[in-house]
């Protein structure tokens, strides 16, 4: 078993970042809700150390979430971060007080003593930048602890109990605004907990192949392939694990970008030699979408049809015992979060959530433990082409939601495809593709007057969108150079018949969303 760390979640917005940093340092870790941890679960998970996350609560509240006693009885090293530090101090005999000024944002800590967390990063006497976000603060530390760093707003910015191997910090080492934070976390997991550097995608590949074989046995697995990163990696991994017991179904809804459908068939059928059913259902999708302009109706129609077609194709190949899905770790954390709760539906996202019960299949989810960047690394490890692995996200309903407020027709799809391909080609040529989270063109439901040569034109206007983001939840528009935009607009208007005006979308999310529908 790989060495591992357990992170107890107290509801911080950035708990996932702790896990990212720990894994980036080569150590496997999981996030569990603090109230699901028991002596037995600790024993079976077998961590070499524990991290207590931050959180929005106050330890002074009557029903404050606190680590269960088994955490301290385990004898394991513990790192408390922000609320995690306060709960440690509160439970172990120190003091936490509220009512002080909130400290939020960049702050500086003075390093007052050496500490195992600081090796190779911070030295006694130094002043270092950190990120703070707290209202309450520790005002007395428990017996056995010493103070190793202080800040203006937090007299005990970092504390240590070397005998017990307990460490705690008021600031957030997991965010990039604490420049040496990743090193501090690496020092905890390697130096203090003694974890090896054994979390690699090569190790994961071997481990997961064995797991899939054990789970599936001689059974048959069906996998929906979309050409996106997640489903592509699932397919390549499963094929390596179970070969011809896997059948992939690619439901081609006719709403893909230029050359994408051909690429899916080319890579998976021709290069990987995977059993692939390519179902060209574009006539069906386009006929059902005819006359439809409402975004939610489009999304629901496409989602429903997708499931129907997928199910029919699965029956044709004789059914299967398992359905493979590209569920990722953030989805898993989301679904077990103790503070989760229904949020407002902004858009009905397209997925195959209802399928397994409807078709009476069990799930195979080999990416359940991975973050997106790890999925990409695994894809490279499996030999998938870079343009597939490094690809921007693409929505399930495809180009249908990029022809907003109007009926979708083959002609419009063709115009949009050509413009989108030119835009992406220009972005790639300028070396900007990897700096952008997502870039695409949107065909607007408006025609404008122009002059081409000596004659009047009356054609569609097109919007270009490009955003930066880390998770798609918030986004900023990408700040292109104006010459780039001018050059791209020119090419699109000259090369794509049907477009005579190009605009650039400078809306961030919120208040906008990334897609237009
Ligand atoms: P929005 O438009 O909600 O998009 O800001 C956030 C991210 O989600 C993608 N997106 C989808 N992905 N099915 C998907 O698989 C969908 O129905 C869907 N709608 C939006 C969007 O492209 C962006 O990356």
Image (cartoon, rainbow, N blue to C red):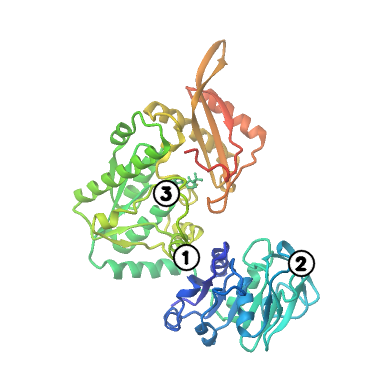
Residue identified by numbered label 3? 228
Q: Which residue is mark 1?
A: 337
Q: How many marks?
A: 3
- The alpha-carbon separation of the residues under discs 1 and 2 comes to 32 Å
Q: Which mark is residue 108?
A: 2
In the rendered image, the quadrant that contains the N terminus is bottom left
- Give the mark nearer the N terminus: 3 vs 2: 2
Mark 2, secondary structure of its residue: strand
Q: Earlier in the sequence, mark 1 or mark 2?
A: 2
For marks 3 and 1, give the one nearer the viewer. Answer: 1
Ligand 1 closer than 8 Å to the CB at disc 2? Answer: no
User: Is ligand 1 closer than 8 angstroms to the Cβ of mark 3?
Assistant: yes
Identify the secondary structure beneath mark 3: loop
Farthest top residue in view: 454
Quick one: SS at disc 1?
loop
Q: Residues within 10 Å of mark 1 (few under 14, many from 20)?
A: some
Of badges 1 and 2, nearer the viewer stands: 1
Q: Quadrant of residue 502?
A: top right
Asked whether 226 or 153 is in front, the reply is 153
Q: Answer above or below: position of 266 versus 212.
A: above
Cα separation between marks 3 and 1: 27 Å
Tag 3 near tag 1, CB within 8 Å: no
Residue in the picture at 65% in, 67% down: 172
Q: Tell me: 267 left or right of 59.
A: left
Give coordinates of residue 67: x percent, y percent. Answer: 54, 78
- 3 or 2: mark nearer the eye: 2
Mark 3 residue crowding within 10 angstroms, few (<14) / some (14–19) / many (20+): many
**Left-right relation of 245 to 488:** left
Q: Position of residue 94 (x, y in %)?
A: 67, 83
Point 52% across, 29% down: residue: 462
Label located before the other in sequence (3 or 1): 3
Asked if disc 1 is less than 8 Å from ligand 1, the answer is no
């Amino acid at each position: 078993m790989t060495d591992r760390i357990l992170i107890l979640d107290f509801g911080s917005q950035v708990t996932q970042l702790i896990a990212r940093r720990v894994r980036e340092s080569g150590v496997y870790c999981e996030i569990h809700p603090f109230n699901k941890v028991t002596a037995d679960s600790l024993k079976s998970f077998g961590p070499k150390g524990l991290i207590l996350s931050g959180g929005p609560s106050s330890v002074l509240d009557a029903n404050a979430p606190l680590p269960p006693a088994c955490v301290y009885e385990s004898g394991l090293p513990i790192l408390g971060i922000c609320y995690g530090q306060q709960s440690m101090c509160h439970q172990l005999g120190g003091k936490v007080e509220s009512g002080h000024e909130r400290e939020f944002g960049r702050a500086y800590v003075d390093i007052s003593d050496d500490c195992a967390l600081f090796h190779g990063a911070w030295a006694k006497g130094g002043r270092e930048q950190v990120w703070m976000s707290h209202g309450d603060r520790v005002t007395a530390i428990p017996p056995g602890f010493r103070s190793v760093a202080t800040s203006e707003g937090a007299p005990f910015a970092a504390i240590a109990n070397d005998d017990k191997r307990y460490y705690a910090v008021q600031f957030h080492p997991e965010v990039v605004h604490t420049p040496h934070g990743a090193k501090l976390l690496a020092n905890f997991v390697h130096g203090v907990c003694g974890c090896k550097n054994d979390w690699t995608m090569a190790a994961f590949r071997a481990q997961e192949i064995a797991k899939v074989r054990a789970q599936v046995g001689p059974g048959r697995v069906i996998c929906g392939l979309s050409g996106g990163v997640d489903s592509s990696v699932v397919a390549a991994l499963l094929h390596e694990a179970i070969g011809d017991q896997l059948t992939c179904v690619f439901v081609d809804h006719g709403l893909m970008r230029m050359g994408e459908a051909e690429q899916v068939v080319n890579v998976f059928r021709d290069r990987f030699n995977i059993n692939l059913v390519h179902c060209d259902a574009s006539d069906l999708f386009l006929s059902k979408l005819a006359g439809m302009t409402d975004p939610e109706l489009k999304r629901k129609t496409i989602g429903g049809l997708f499931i129907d077609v997928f199910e029919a194709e699965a029956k044709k190949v004789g059914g299967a015992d398992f359905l493979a899905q590209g569920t990722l770790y953030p989805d898993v954390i989301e679904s077990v979060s103790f503070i989760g709760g229904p949020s407002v539906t902004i858009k009905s996202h397209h997925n195959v959530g209802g399928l397994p019960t409807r078709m009476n299949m069990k799930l195979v989810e080999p990416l359940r433990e991975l973050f997106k960047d790890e999925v990409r690394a695994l894809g490279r490890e499996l030999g998938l082409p870079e343009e597939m692995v490094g690809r921007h996200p693409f929505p399930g309903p495809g180009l249908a939601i990029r022809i907003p407020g109007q009926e979708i027709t083959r002609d419009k799809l063709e115009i949009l495809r050509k413009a989108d391909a030119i835009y992406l080609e220009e972005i790639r040529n300028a070396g900007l593709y990897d700096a952008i989270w997502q870039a695409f063109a949107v065909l607007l439901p408006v025609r404008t007057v122009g002059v081409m040569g000596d004659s009047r034109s009356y054609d569609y206007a097109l919007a270009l969108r490009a955003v930066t983001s880390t998770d798609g939840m918030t986004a900023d528009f990408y700040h292109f150079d104006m010459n780039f935009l001018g050059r791209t607009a020119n090419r699109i208007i000259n090369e794509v018949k049907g477009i005579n005006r190009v605009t650039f979308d400078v809306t961030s999310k919120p208040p906008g969303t990334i897609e237009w529908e």
